[in-house]
Image (tube, rainbow, N blue to C red):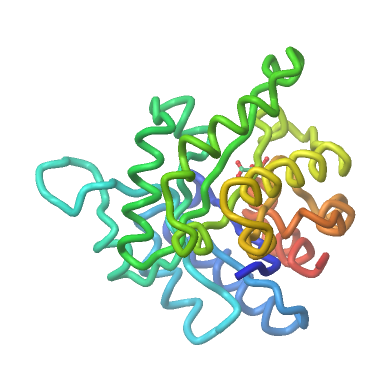
Amino acid sequence: MRKNIAAGNWKMNLDLEAGKKLASEVVNMVNDEVSNDAEIILIPPFIHLTAVNQLIGSASNIQLGAQNCHQEKGGAYTGEISLEMLKSVGAEYVVIGHSERREYFGEDNALLAAKTKAVLDNGLKPIYCCGEKLDVREADKHFELNKEQIVEGLFDLSKDEILNVVIAYEPVWAIGTGVTASNEQAQEMHAFIRGLIADKYDQETADSISILYGGSVKPGNAKELFEQPDVDGGLVGGASLKSRDFTDIIKSF
Ligand code: PGA
């Protein structure tokens, strides 16, 4: 179901104590200050999931997410984490195909399609990421590239399945750089992605999916980005590591 979402991707940051401190600050600030109906997702490193889940406790507007998963059920995959494991520690969401996974770990659309399907088969929700690098945008191939990532990663799913997917458009040139896509650039790509879903499935399905923007979302730009008609929230990296900033982003809806 389409809803406003603020997801905080901690990436490979914070030791256990610092992670617990951040999570409890966010939980308290959200409790005290947030009155909108946005869904908040905390996405710590795997090893902090259990501790963060305990701190989230019964806060019904805060969910737990993982940054990655393995697509197989289990077995001899040293160093990997299965969906059963993620479920057992309270994860509801799994980020799939973050540009850092695509770039540094060679994850391609075929693998990401398998991971997305596995997440859904396990009753969890994928946050499927797409986004172009700067050279692709400069060559004016960004629509083509995002289309390829969406079609190859998601379009083998049934209508019922894709309704449980959250999409995150994250232009790589805006991630961690301080450069944010303009409101117009974000809206244009989000509308394009929603149009692809409408063409493949139908308009009602497209209108039911949350599409998040990611890439240097900050308290100072969140409101105007989230006001765009096809931007349903943000996947936030750096600013999610500061409880004050992340809470202010949540309050921007
Ligand atoms: P950033 O990261 O907010 O630090 O740019 C966003 C992301 O990679 O999800």
Is residue 18 something one can see in this rendering?
no
Measured from the top left, where is residue 101 in percent x and y?
45, 34
Q: Residue at x 48, y 45 (%)?
A: 154
Nearest the viewer among 114 and 85 is 114
User: Looking at the picture, does residue 218 appear above or below residue 37?
Assistant: above
Nearest the viewer among 227 and 250 is 227
Give left or right: position of 14 versus 49. Answer: right
Give left or right: position of 251 versus 160. Answer: right
User: Looking at the picture, does residue 20 appear above or below residue 128?
Assistant: below
Q: Quadrant of residue 192?
A: top right
Count numbered badges in the picture: 0
Give left or right: position of 77 versus 64. Answer: left
Q: Quadrant of residue 179?
A: top right
Q: Residue at x 28, y 47 (%)?
A: 71
User: Looking at the picture, does residue 3 appear above or below residue 82?
Assistant: below
* Farthest left residue in view: 76
Q: Residue at x 33, y 43 (%)?
A: 114
- Specify the quadrant that holds the N terminus: bottom right
Is residue 60 something one can see in this rendering?
yes
Measured from the top left, where is residue 76 in percent x and y?
10, 43
Nearest the viewer among 91 and 164 is 164
Measured from the top left, where is residue 127 in percent x and y?
52, 53
Nearest the viewer among 167 and 191 is 191
Q: Residue at x 49, y 51 (%)?
A: 14
